[in-house]
Image (tube, coloured by chain):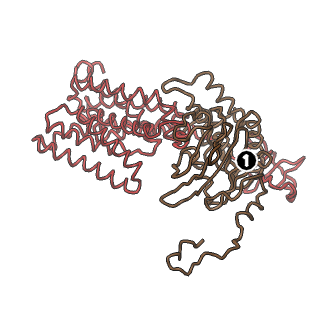
Amino acid sequence: MIEVLAFPFMQRALLAALLTGLMAPAVGTYIVQRRLSLLGDGLGHVAIAGVGLALITGQAPIPVAVVVCVAGAVLVETLREFGKASGDVGLAILFYGGLAAGVLMSGIAGSGAAALSGYLFGSLTTVTRSDLIMVGVLAVVVLVPAIGLAPQLFAVCTDEDFARVQGLQVRSYNIMIVALAAITVTLAMRTVGLLLVSALMVIPVAAASNLVRGFYAALGCAMVVGVLVSVGGAAGAYYADTAPGALIVVLAILVFVLTLPASALLRRRHQAALELPESVDDDNVVLPHVDTGVHPHQHGPGCGHPYVQHGDHTDFIHEGHRHAQHADHYDEH
Amino acid sequence: MSIGTAPERTDVISADNVTVQLGGLPVLRGIDLRVHRGEAVALMGGNGSGKSTLVRSLIRLLPYQRGEVRLFGTPLNSFRAWSRIGYVPQRSAPVLRGAKVKEVVASGRLARRKPFLPLGAGDRSAVSQALAVVDLADRATSEMTTLSGGQQQRVLIARALAGEPDLLVLDEPTAGVDLRSQQALADLLAERVAAGASVLVVLHEVGALQSLLDRAVVLHEGRVISDGPVVPSDESKRLARHEHDEQRPNRDQPWLGGAVER
């Protein structure tokens, strides 16, 4: 690790990876809540058009790509809001149009499709000093609202109607979420790459939801996972001499798989207490009294039989029927 | 007072001649509705009568095409005091899978909070108070998905109460809820009304809420067909199914063929 830090380009790469690892899961939490998990992937395609435009005009790629991608994201959100029926096809045209335009412009610029591969899968050596400053500034722009406005964004993502009645500007918040996603996607193009950034937005969130309970805890946990896998992946890519994006995503999936047993454990501990509602609509109905007769087994907590809350008492599930304590015997319920 | 009735200052909700269209079809026509301060009013009617549409229009979740709606005397378009309204949507509506109960209830404080500032002491005590009112204080840190349907409904009510609203708007809070829980809801709402709050509740049947309600407004096919004291459920159904004395519309005309078919 010390050896890695000796190179200035690696210092820059690791810093950029750290910031990406913080941003992508923070924004990803809201994207997943809104069930737009694949939005990041589409925005990555749009960002390619931005890179192509930068190559053809000789500008720095990151600022141009950010502008193009944010514009695309706002267009996507507007399409979603107003043209629900045709939104799906509209998105496909926008996304693949972006990809095609990017490749085309890159070709005209004389760099060919190969020049794009560093943006598609990440490239450690190419993070320049000015890139890093840009990433740092925009990371603040993304993280401050993503964390500071978490209660508002959480309400908008989970229950839009209720958020509206709380007086929140739902449309502005929705546009903000996709704009933040667009900035994050574009900034991640040097570290994870545009084609794989969506994985860094979604997989740490999925892993976090296996590990912790509650919205804010999941947000924090996802960011920790994101930082671990992006810094680990970027450093590992140096030793493996490979594109960092692939290693970062493979690490993220590994973490997710490791969290699966934890999820099963948590789920068992927090399982919903089963409850059978007792019919109280009519007190005049008298249920038949069916006595189980002599019952050799004593039901109780930890007797091994599954049990269920039934109105004001507990029924023990016994070979497909339910036993309820009644004086010195059990009733069939 | 000039033509029409000027909204009284004590009106919490006043709707005059409101028409709502959905997808070009008129769903509500010429609706007049008043909820006075401290009143509990039920909005009733069969499926498709437009009661949910009306309640959503009154709190600006749906646009209306004609007429005027005022909340607390302020025209709906310039109404900003959203903290005065506590909204309980239909249970099926929200997706709150991963959230904890207290996180959901705390979102009921948003209308009173400034962006970027954390929950204050007042917010926290309002949240725990609201949870105590619905008898879920011990489930504050539980995940929503681990709660039964009836408990989730109570969380949504607590979320509305956490904002300490002056008007509670509930959309079918008794749907699929057993009589005992309905009674608990009635008691809870009665306490709010006694404290000066007003209630507008969408109901399919009066059920246990009968004693709470001052008035019932019954909708049928997008129009108000009665506004007055609460009538027991079966009688309101008879009202909604009244027969026309006059001749039925002529359906032999080809251009009327499908339009008046029920």
Tell me the shade of chain A: red
Q: Residue furthest bottom?
A: B252
Q: How many marks?
A: 1
Q: Quadrant of residue A102?
A: top left
Residue B105 or residue A28, whichever sits in front: B105
Q: Is residue B172 left or right of residue A102?
A: right
Residue A295 or residue A220, whichever sits in front: A220
Horizontal and vertical percent position of residue B151: 67, 42
Horizontal and vertical percent position of residue B188: 75, 39
Q: Is residue B55 visible?
A: yes
Tell me the shade of chain B: brown
Residue B224 or residue B23, whichever sits in front: B224
Q: Is residue A113 left or right of residue B242?
A: left
Q: Residue at x 45, y 38 (%)?
A: A30
Q: Residue at x 62, y 21 (%)?
A: B121
Quadrant location of the C terminus of chain A in the rendered image? bottom right
Q: Which residue is mark 1?
A: A308
